[in-house]
Image (cartoon, rainbow, N blue to C red):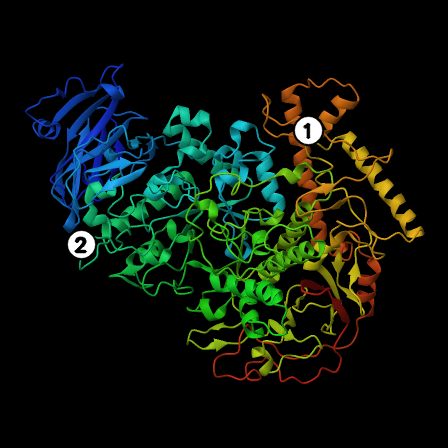
Amino acid sequence: MRNPPLHRYATRPGFYFTDDGGADVVVRSETAGQVWLCVLESIDRPSAFFQDAIRLFSDPGSSFIRQIHEFPVCTRIIEHLYLRETLFRMTGPNYGLWYVHLPKAWDGMRYGYRVDGAWDPKHGVRFNPYKFLLDPYGKGVEGAMELDPAAFSYACEVQDRKVIGSAYGEMSTVDSLGHVPVSVAIDDRDIHKHVGDPDHPHVPWRKTVIYELHVKGFTANAPWLPEELRGTYAGLAHPITLAYLQNLGVTSIELLPIQAKQDELFLQEHGRHNYWGYSTLSYFSPEPSYATKAAQAKGATAVRLEVINMVRALHEAGFEVIMDVVYNHTCEGGVEGPTMCWRGLDDLAYYRHQKANPGRLEDTTGCGNTFDFTNTHVVTFAVDSLRYWAKRIGIDGFRFDLGVTLARLNGEFTQHHPFLYALRSDLLLGNLKLIMEPWDLGNLGWRTGQFSIPFAEWNDRFRDTARTFWLQDVDDSTDFGRTSLQEMATRLCGSADLFATDPGRGATASINFVTCHDGFTLTDLTRYNSKHNEANGENNNDGSSVNHSANFGVEGVTDAPEIIAAREQAAMNLTGMLMLSLGTPMMLAGDEFRNTQDGNNNAYCQDNDITWMSWDWLYSPHKTREMRRLETVSRLVSLRKSLDLYHHEDFFTRLTQLGLLKPSDRVKWFLPDGTPPKESDWFDLGVRSFTMRLLSNSEVDVCIVVNGVAEDRQFHLPSDSKWAPKWCSAEINGRWPAQGDRAAENETSEDISVWMQHVQNADETVRRLAEQARTQEETDRRLRAGSNASASTGASSDDRGDTGAIPDDVLTTEFGVVPARGDDGQLPNFPASEPGSGSDAVPDSTADAYQAANTGSDASTDAESLAERRTMQVTDALRAVGHAAAAAVSDDGIGQMPGFQRSSVDSATDSVSGAGSGLPGDGSVAPSGTSAAEAGMGTGTQANDAGTVWTMPALSITLMKQV
């Protein structure tokens, strides 16, 4: 039995190419009076519909809208747009759907809809056939909205970029075509389209390290890319970009929204743009502006192909691709906003309306409107979109912006919402990574931990605890902080109090983060007490005023060495806690090399150097602070991935099937004197130093040692094992844990970075000059030591040796370096490097310029060979960083951190003896109503042998490994 025509599409809107050379087109509008499909063609080419369409002419006695009602197919010429618009009257509504069959259709065809019906804005009905509407299921989009009265369904004017008019006034009769974007059809029927696709990485949750980045901002200033690839999908897929990400060690790339976007009305009125992309224009179309100019010129199909190729390249490099999606609201904003799509198709069906005033929209997003997820067809629309991105584009997971809004049933949140069940039960989506932002701006909008299996959630409690402990409490310089030992232990152990909500739900459901796109960067957290959002044009009223940040005495950039050192160590403390806690860590792109937004904690509208990554530090031949942090962070990430102790999804304390807390012996806690905490210690705000021991039956144990006080402190580690430090936050400032009563100091100054040996400006000339600089520095240091010369000013604290001498080659501010003197005693004159300038696609190197200026060599090097050579240089540098990280996780590399004595570790590993304390430990918290002793946290009895004594640097977090 054959199905009737269109039966298979009866519940699924969309644009479907057919074998007869045409297409079946379906759109949903439950309350419209009439719907037309509109096809746009250039008037300098023959029309595909000449035989079917009736030509319309301007008639003073009959409006355009009245004319299109008269004929099933009609066409009109729009001379000022050089377009022909052919309108096909659709049949319907059939269960809310409208249908038409196009006799001819082609890839790249531009189209849209016009919808007629009642105009009653006070009751939420805003049909206007003069408005050209996007296809909600359109897979391509072209053009952009202009701030013009034509874009609005109500009669209005635009004066000085301000919209003047009432959304409840008369209907606009100005045609919007030419002032709004249009949909583009993409023929996607090729059955071989997935042939040759690389396998999806399918990284287990327990091994996932997420890296949040913006497609454009990450490479907009990338010096390794030709100008035409910067800030594009192709730029992110470039081999050097992928090599950088690989050597950093992250596993999953979380992209800020790449669905087509449109600037909100507020931003358009103020001449600014939505950079982040949380203002969706089309849920099936990629954002065209992130594609290369060549792809944009070829059209929507080429743009989409560039996105697909980016995802393929990331998969081939071993990365998962997680996409940030915004299904809670659209770019149309409040009722005063423009009419692009949903408002014109069926405002009542798509958006939530106030019950007492249906002419106004509910807004739990802060963006003017809210999708109505109580409507089954809105749920279907979102699921269809997600499946398309997963199946056709290859996305491995989704992060849902303002996820609580998606789970509101009749206005109230429920974890049993049909949309959440639809995601869980879908055979494709239910097996992807699904991450919720567990809050919105509605009633009782904070819901962290309440989404249940299989969803992971951003853990804002982890963020706030880490910031408060390492920043606010430290900056206040008091003996008592705001964070108890129990709170820290709970966050370090995966936040069981929030996420152990269902049997089987593990710590990986907690997406631990310290920074994200929304807020301060890691560097700005340590530079600013207050937000500085003046550039946003809202009088610094936007963005959160509660940041739990600290400036360590000076607001903003400073050249004071002691403040710079304190800030750097604080940043590493936060990173250390992030990577050494149970749960799924998420990093913000750029935090690994001191990226800053100059104190802007809400840079959503800054599509410029404020938000674009700065890679200038790659050009320095010296060990800049950016390089130091990058190497320190990459080693830490590699260490985490090497430890099977983190490769599980259980809580140490978790719910049993009966709903009872089940204690575990996989973690033990100790105070600095080696004794387990007493019950009162868990809530004593003065207890800021402790050891967390993670025990394993299959590999060596590790200790996470936290020294939260502003002085070096001795710790008695468990005496049943030998211990050696693998990573310490204080190493960023040249300090390292040591056995005995003193922490180790950096004894050498490593001026030459592993990057410097390979990047664009680091050819033989620069290496020779740097080697000369180091030799001269050592000579100068000996002379100063012999003459008891005092140290010069302007050096950072982490560049001082034990004698207090300061080398010539040191950082003098938070950004710059002063090169060391050459053989002639003068500072070498490195010509400025200007990436991306001139006609060459690849920037000139400093070394090349130096040679041309000083040796008379031929500067006209072949561009292609130069680009190839530089690509190899940067790739070699990335590989070297990776090798350094690999050495850090190897037991052979223990104690061989640059500048530290091997003897301090050797003596530790050789001298530890005696039996362990055998004191029991607990998971993360003492259950409510249960004593610490009953929970297995120990009774406070002094251990017979407190173990090896190690001195930990002040305000540090250290990873100690059993050897």
Residue 91 vertical placement versus 632 (above, below): above
Is residue 955 visible in the rendered structure shown here? yes
Q: Quadrant of the C terminus?
A: bottom right
Residue 623 occupies quadrant: top right
Instruction: State the SS at label 1.
Output: loop
Residue 845 badge: 1
Observer-nearest residue: 864 or 339? Answer: 339
Instruction: State the SS at label 2.
Output: loop
Give the side of residue 770 with respect to residue 574, left or right. right
Observer-nearest residue: 612 or 372? Answer: 612
Residue 186 occupies quadrant: top left
- Name the residue type under label 1: Ser
Residue 875 vertical placement versus 469 (above, below): above
- Name the residue type under label 2: Pro
Residue drawn at the location 41% of the way across and 48% of the way down: 538
Residue 137 vertical placement versus 297 (above, below): below
Residue 718 picture location, percent across and down: 71, 73
Residue 920 picture location, percent across and down: 62, 79
Give the side of residue 405 with respect to residue 915, left or right. left
Is residue 20 visible in the rendered structure shown here? no
Question: Mark 2 = which residue?
Answer: 358
Residue 519 picture location, percent across and down: 49, 53
- Cα distance between the residues tagged 2 and 1: 63 Å
Give the side of residue 945 with respect to residue 644, left or right. right
Mark 1 residue crowding within 10 angstroms, few (<14) / some (14–19) / many (20+)? many
